[in-house]
Image (tube, rainbow, N blue to C red):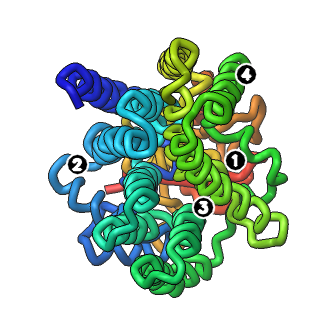
Amino acid sequence: MNRRQAWILAGIIAAAALVRFATLDHQSYDHDEAVTAWRVLESGLGQTLHVAVNSERSPPLYYLLAWLWSKLFGTGEVGLRSLSALIGTLTVPAAYLAARELSSRRAGLIAAALVAFNPYLVWYSQEARSYALFVFFAAWGVYFFALCLNDPSRRNLGLWATASGLALCSHYFAAFLVGAEGLWLVARGWPRRAPIVAVGATVAVGLALIPLALTQEGTGRRNLFTGVPVVRRGAGSPSVRHFREAAVLAGLILAAIALVLLLRRATRREREGSLIIVGAAAAAIVVPFVLAYLGVDFFHPRNLIGSLEPLLVAAGIGFGCSRARRLGLASAGAAVLVFIAVLVAVYESGQMQRPDYRGAAEAMGPPSGPRVLVVLRNANEPIAYYRNGREFKPPHFKRERVDEIDVLSTLSTISPPDHGFRLTEKRGLAPCCILWRYRARARTLVRPGEVSHVLKEPSVTLIDGVR
């Protein structure tokens, strides 16, 4: 790499850090992030791991790192999300190295830029969950996989097995991408022993995680997204919802151009390497999709995020292949501009952001005493986090005297609470929800079951202001 290319790569990595770190507190915590900050990490390490095992559906590696990180930087949006932002930034060099290994430095720089600005990857690099860590280890696994395609030495196979094992410890869906890569390495290297040992070591990690996965699945909680048909689930994810129709169309066109360039203008080495990693990424999408139709249904777009980086690497190779010339560079530039436009749109539009539960909690204001909060189901953890609330139910709370009941709903009409509470305020908190405030003339005894009827949508009753 010459000095000019080194500066370009450094600039891309710096830009990746900027788009991830600069807006960490621009959006409120969503439900799952609040669970991380409020339920999982607010305790000692042993308790954190206990909660992760018994209430989460992913391996505990992220929560271990997040617990350590939170002791230094806290559990606020900037402090906790900065771990994911750092991990997301360090994913960019992996994309560069993978594309460089399979093609050229120019392709590596293009792949790095695509990963740096991809809105889906930026979104999850700003989320206090395990997805950025999953992408990080999957991306480095793809690089080491590319090394193995060119030189299946014990060192390279060992590096691939290490990254793949850590990816499995970050997210169970890594098994699909890692499995596809492992099958290819064994088939290509057969009957050599080294690939079998490397894949066997990775399989051993996966087998060791099965008891944990079964324990987590046996907690009795069900995946709410399974009530939505498989083919429609993508519409509810940031990958589609936050790419408006024009952006989706532009992305499909650019992906088609990258594929045509790979097939028509890439060298044999570039084409073969790219199609191999595309095949592995495609298998990691298709297999869980098929399993969902067969009844083993854990299919959700965010769980497939590990496949995105290798697809972007392949696109980078297509745009940057030896005979793509100006068409490739122009297409890569257009792709980056589309990504940046979507990032700006997400920043400016509340409709494209996470629900503003922080703003809703601020609108409630500080309590003058014990106060009941009836909130829609997915708002319960964020509101509890921002308002320091607890769930209003036995055995901790059988009854409480309160003079205020606040209701947070997406409905335009609700059933008012009993016991002489009267509506004193109704405020729209677009685009999140509506805040209804009820007050009584004097503190009134309220039991948990007496306010559960207020909302005609799934809800949770909280209480704050309790000493």
Residue most toward the front?
268
Q: Secondary structure at mark 1?
A: loop
User: Could you say where residue 71 lies in the image, as x and y percent from the top left?
Assistant: 18, 56
**Residue matched to label 4:** 249
Look at discs 2 and 1 and give the one toward the viewer: 2
Mark closest to the chain's N terminus, 1 or 4: 4
Mark closest to the chain's N terminus, 1 or 3: 1
At x 54% / y 24%, what residue is drawn? 323
Look at discs 1 and 3 and give the one toward the viewer: 3
Q: Sort mark 4 into few (<14), some (14-19) or many (20+) by Cα contacts within 10 Å.
A: few
**Distance CA(mark 1)–CA(mark 4):** 52 Å
Q: Secondary structure at mark 4?
A: helix
User: Could you say where residue 400 lies in the image, as x and y percent from the top left?
Assistant: 49, 59
User: Could you say where residue 226 lies in the image, as x and y percent from the top left?
Assistant: 76, 60
Mark closest to the chain's N terminus, 4 or 2: 2
Mark closest to the chain's N terminus, 3 or 2: 2
At x 30% / y 61%, what residue is drawn? 42
Mark closest to the chain's N terminus, 2 or 1: 2
Q: Sort mark 3 into few (<14), some (14-19) or many (20+) by Cα contacts within 10 Å.
A: some
Q: Quadrant of the C terminus?
A: bottom left
Q: Is residue 271 visible?
A: yes
Q: Secondary structure at mark 2?
A: loop
**Residue matched to label 3:** 448
Q: Sort mark 2 into few (<14), some (14-19) or many (20+) by Cα contacts within 10 Å.
A: some
Q: Amino acid at mark 3?
A: Pro
Q: Quadrant of the N terminus?
A: top left
**Residue matched to label 2:** 74
Rendered view: 223 above or below 336: below
Q: Secondary structure at mark 3?
A: helix
Q: Amino acid at mark 4?
A: Leu
**Residue matched to label 1:** 418
